[in-house]
Image (cartoon, helix red, strand yellow):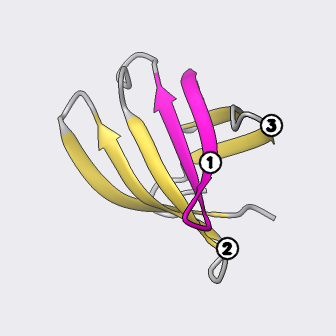
Amino acid sequence: MRPDGGYIIQIQGIDSSGKMEAKYFNPRLINVSKAQAKRENGKIKVFVELSDVGYPGSTYTLTYDPKEDVLRGIYYQAAMKQSFDVYFTRMK
């Protein structure tokens, strides 16, 4: 969950190619057009692209921080052409 607004990325699974089955909520369900995970330089990277009303082309590019157990990175809001530093905490 993103603490600054209650946004949620729900990762339901990752296949062997890195394709993720993911959902995004704000708080309603927003369509995810692409979700991918990969290991790069020993770090887990996550990319999520949204394609819904108000969100076409908006993306999250995140890196997992195991010490803090968070996904941290950049949210690109395509409609406004702006990038924001964000992080997601794990919901337990």
**Three-letter code for the amino acid on which mark 2 is drawn:** Asp
Give the residue displayed 67% in from the left and 76% down from the top. Answer: 66
Marks 1 and 2, Cα distance to the nearest angstrom?
Answer: 17 Å
Marks 3 and 1, Cα distance to the nearest angstrom?
Answer: 10 Å
Q: Is residue 34 above or below residue 22?
A: above
Mark 1, residue position: 38
Badge nearest the viewer, 1 or 2 = 1
The answer to which quarter of the image holds residue 68 is bottom right
Q: Is mark 2 on a helix, strand or loop?
A: loop
Q: Give the range drawn in magenta.
A: 30-50
Q: What element carries label 1?
A: strand
Expressed as whole percent of the image width and height from the top left, the position of residue 61 reads 44, 48
Question: 90 or 59: nearer the eye?
Answer: 59
* Residue 7 as seen in the image, left or right of residue 54: right
Mark 3, residue position: 16
Q: In this view, does 11 lie above or below 52?
A: below
Mark 2, residue position: 69
Is the magenta region chiefly helix, strand or loop?
strand
Give the residue displayed 38% in from the left and 25% down from the top. Answer: 55
Question: Counting residues from the N terminus, which is met first, the one under dot 3 or under dot 1?
Answer: 3
